[in-house]
Image (cartoon, grey):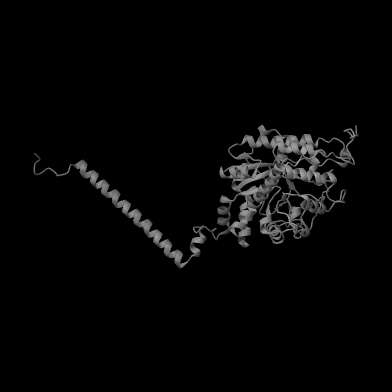
């Protein structure tokens, strides 16, 4: 039997009871504090609804523009229509993928750390090679100039860099691929050919580029080609075809059948107009701005922008605004405000659902003040938010508008192929290397 002096509960049991009591007391304190915070938050929200929106707690964007930009880009990252990173690889490293340190500071505007800082969800890798000189290619573009070989090298270096950094880049050939990459917190990587001078006068080459993963072809660069007229550069070039050539119309038709986006940046006004009217699929400008804001030939005039929209006489499209200083403003005046002015003008004329971002980073020498590299996209979103752009409109600008156009072009291709539309086998009529078809 226990003596009268022994405790009814042993010291070990007593300690356990005291510990449980302390835990229970702490839980009561914590839960009481949480309940109190919730009550205070509800009261404050009822008294001052703007309090929750200021901090982004209401489902709306925060009132602070910088916070709003970060929040928006977390859910709708930038899909840039045109970046010339492969050109930097070509001229900086002779396309030696093994030596290119994309995970550290690169010499121009683009590298992985700055892409991440800029909240980039995807971009088109421009597999660009320059126009041949008129002397080298000849009056009818018939002399061999290695444009196709060099394009294949640029496709190769782009794919090599994408594969080298699998934790950051995801190769993409469809709108679905882009969305999947973004969901996986990777940077969707799509290929674009910047100029039909890179086709070697051949629609067959177009098909092979598509098979290699290219998903847009710009109809011209700064030079005319066998398919279409270019706008030139700052001043317009004298026309050759007065828009699309007969082979150019066939090229657009084959692009529609394949699902290759028709890119109208660099094209003359007549080329752009004819392509818009002839194309069965939506079109893009991968990196162009508004001529009404800065009057240079490379920018899109209002009479062409007026053809863009959802009306009966209009074509769905997206104009992805260029950041190149000479296209944005007069010398020394290009800044983030001027770029925002271009975006707002295109949104005003064509509609807010028809504007996007196509910086031209790594392919330009003069960047706007405040938009010096790919890390600066949030600053542009913040500026537009200050100007009253809504969450949905900003999400369209950063990538939603482009994805809609891309998906629509994919649907047109699917429908054309399902209807049995045959490939185009038209041959450039000035070629002399193929025999003339004779009746047997």
Q: Position of residue 397 (x, y in %)?
A: 64, 54
Q: Position of residue 411 (x, y in %)?
A: 67, 46
Q: Position of residue 232 (x, y in %)?
A: 82, 50
Q: Nearer the viewer, residue 403 or 295?
A: 403
> Compared to 140, does 377 lie above or below?
below
Quadrant (top left, top right, bottom left, bottom right) of the N terminus: top left
State how many labels appear.
Answer: 0
> Compared to 311, does 169 lie above or below?
above
Q: Nearer the viewer, residue 110 or 158?
A: 158
Quadrant (top left, top right, bottom left, bottom right) of the C terminus: top right
Residue in view at x 62 percent, y 60 percent = 389
> Compared to 33, does 362 lie above or below?
above
Relative placement, left or right, of 299 versus 21 is right
Q: Is residue 100 visible?
A: no
Q: Nearer the viewer, residue 106 or 77?
A: 77
Relative placement, left or right, of 131 versus 75 is right
Q: Is residue 129 visible?
A: yes
Q: Position of residue 277 (x, y in %)?
A: 78, 53
């Amino acid at each position: 039997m226990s003596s009268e002096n022994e405790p009814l509960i042993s010291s070990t049991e007593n300690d356990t009871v005291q510990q449980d009591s302390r835990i229970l007391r702490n839980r009561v304190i914590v839960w009481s504090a949480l309940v109190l915070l919730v009550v205070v938050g509800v009261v404050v929200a009822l008294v001052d609804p703007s309090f929750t929106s200021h901090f982004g707690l209401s489902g709306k964007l925060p009132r602070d523009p910088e916070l709003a930009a970060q929040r928006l880009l977390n859910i709708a990252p930038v899909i840039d229509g045109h970046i010339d990173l492969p050109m930097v690889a070509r001229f900086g490293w002779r396309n030696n993928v093994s030596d290119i340190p994309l995970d550290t500071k690169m010499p121009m505007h683009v590298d992985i750390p700055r892409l991440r800082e800029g909240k980039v969800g995807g971009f088109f890798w421009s597999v660009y090679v320059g126009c041949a000189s008129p002397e080298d290619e000849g009056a009818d573009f018939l002399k061999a100039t290695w444009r196709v070989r060099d394009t294949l090298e640029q496709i190769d270096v782009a794919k090599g860099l994408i594969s080298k950094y699998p934790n950051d880049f995801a190769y993409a050939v469809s709108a679905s691929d882009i969305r999947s990459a973004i969901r996986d917190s990777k940077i969707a990587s799509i290929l674009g050919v910047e100029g039909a001078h890179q086709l070697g006068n051949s629609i067959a080459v177009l098909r092979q580029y598509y098979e290699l993963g290219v998903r847009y072809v710009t109809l011209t660069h700064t030079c005319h080609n066998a398919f279409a007229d270019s706008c030139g550069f700052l001043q317009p070039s004298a026309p050759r075809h007065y828009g699309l050539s007969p082979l150019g119309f066939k090229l657009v038709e084959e692009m529609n059948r394949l699902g290759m986006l028709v890119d109208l940046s660099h094209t003359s006004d007549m080329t752009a107009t004819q392509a818009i009217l002839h194309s069965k699929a939506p079109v893009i400008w991968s990196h162009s701005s508004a001529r009404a804001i800065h009057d240079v030939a490379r920018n899109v005039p209002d009479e062409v922008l007026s053809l863009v929209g959802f009306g009966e006489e209009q074509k769905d499209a997206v104009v992805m605004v260029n950041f190149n200083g000479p296209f944005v403003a007069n010398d020394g005046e290009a800044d983030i405000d001027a770029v925002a002015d271009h975006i707002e003008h295109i949104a005003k004329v064509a509609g807010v659902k028809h504007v996007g971002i196509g910086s031209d980073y790594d392919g330009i020498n003069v960047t706007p003040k405040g938009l010096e590299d790919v890390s600066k996209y949030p600053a542009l979103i913040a500026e537009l938010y200050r100007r009253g752009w809504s969450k949905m409109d900003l999400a369209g600008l950063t990538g939603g508008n482009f994805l809609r156009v891309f998906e629509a072009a994919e649907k047109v291709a699917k429908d054309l192929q399902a209807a049995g539309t045959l490939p185009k086998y038209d041959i450039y009529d000035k070629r002399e290397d193929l025999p003339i078809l004779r009746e047997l």
